[in-house]
Amino acid sequence: MSQTDPVRASFDEALATLQAFMASPEALPNVQRFVEAASETLARGGKLLSCGNGGSMCDAMHFAEEWTGRFRGNRSALPAIAFSDPSQLTCIANDFGFDEVFARQVEALGKPGDLLVMMSTSGNSPNCLRAVEEAHKRGVRVVGLLGKGGGKLATLVDIPIIVPLAQTSDRIQEVHIKVLHIVIEAVERRMFPKNY
């Protein structure tokens, strides 16, 4: 990173990360699979669940609110829930340990036909691993937005979307939020074409 112009260097690094993602042979096909899975889930009356730690939790909340609120134009609210309620998270962590904070919510809310969108920049977060395990028990498909090679989650989720090149969470999350917005737009174009 340039010491003379760190702002430009950061934008260049972000651009290189996005270009590496676009050049990855698995990236766009797996984003398309995410679109198909989300479309099928909503068309069949299922719901979208999302979770992650730290900044990834913020992305999970952002993802959910775009469905229940509005993205590009007015339309019916769609069922999406982020596992982000502080009282639930702290209760579960206190009673069962932090590794269970998402798995317990999958157990409570996940039904066959639902879709869990899991975000982990390392791909190795124990609470995310437990949530995937619980989702599979309940017939819930899992999309993983991942980084750093995908970690353990890469082979456990149904649809892995891995950001290559980047080694820091901020660059990985910048691509994750682009993927989330693009998936929402693609699904909305199918379900509410008059908004476009």
Image: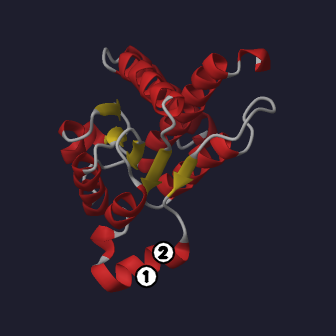
Rendering coords of residue 184 (x, y %): 59, 30
Residue lying furthest bottom in this view?
Answer: 94
The answer to the question of whether label 1 and label 2 lie on touching residues, with beta carbons closer than 8 A, is: yes
Left or right of 187 in this view: 143: left
The residue indicated by pointer 1 is 91
Q: What residue sits 80% from the left and 29% below the top?
A: 73
Q: What residue sits 22% from the left and 53% below the top?
A: 133
Left or right of 60 in this view: 131: left
Residue 158 visible at all: yes
Please tell me which residue lies in front, 69 or 167: 69
- The C terminus is located in which quarter? top right
Rendering coords of residue 58 (x, y %): 56, 55
Please tell me which residue lies in front, 25 or 65: 65
In the displayed structure, would residue 38 be above or below residue 147? above
The residue indicated by pointer 2 is 88
Instruction: Say what secondary structure mark 1 lies in.
Output: helix
